Image (cartoon, helix red, strand yellow):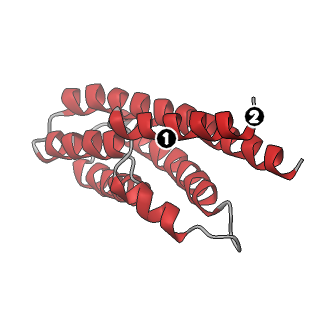
Amino acid sequence: MDGYGMQNQIACIRRSLFDQGYLDEQFIQLEELQDDTNPNFVQEIVTLFYTDSTRLIQNIELTLNSRPINFSKLDDYLHQFKGSSSSIGAKKVTSECAVFRQYCAAGNAEACIRNFQHIKQEHAILRKKLEFYFQMMGQAAVAQTT
């Protein structure tokens, strides 16, 4: 594939992430911070997000499995998770976190457990989509240098 075709494909992948509601304008703001001195800035931020969110998911699971469930602690974890998701523009994950926090405030353990599966699913889907996007960006960068 030529450079133009690859750039067009990358643009389509990126656009689909927004059109499908996976990302919001915060992701664009991150991209605007990227420059020639730090060409992998967005990818590095997203990688940090996934490192941090993996830890938070483990803490949430442990808290959900404890009895009685400490809803205050659970809400604190979800507040952190929602904030970090929002900071990279992870729209669907952020939205699911907001729903979870409502269930948490209501003390609804079953709804929390059910909703947490949605959060993990959206988190995993976005991760795969972003990994593919960054992989394509990397291939395009290599193609430009050859």
Helix, strand or loop at mark 2: loop
Q: Tell me if residue 42 comes above or below residue 114 in the rendering.
A: below
Q: Within 10 angstroms of label 1, few (less than 14), some, or many (20 or more) residues? A: some
- Total residue callouts: 2
Q: Nearer the viewer, residue 121 or 104?
A: 121
* Front label number (1 vs 2): 2
Residue 84 visible somewhere in the drawing: no
The residue lying at 29 percent from left, 29 percent from top is: 113
Q: Mark on residue 14? A: 1
- Callout 2, which amino acid? Asp
The residue lying at 63 percent from left, 70 percent from top is: 35
Q: Tell me if residue 37 comes above or below residue 112 in the rendering.
A: below
Q: Nearer the viewer, residue 35 or 120?
A: 35
Tell me the CA gap for discs 1 and 2.
Answer: 18 Å
Give coordinates of residue 12: x percent, y percent.
50, 34
Horizontally, is 6 left or right of 86 in the view?
right
Q: Mark on residue 2? A: 2
Helix, strand or loop at mark 1: helix
Looking at the rendering, in which quadrant would you find the N terminus?
top right
- Callout 1, which amino acid? Arg
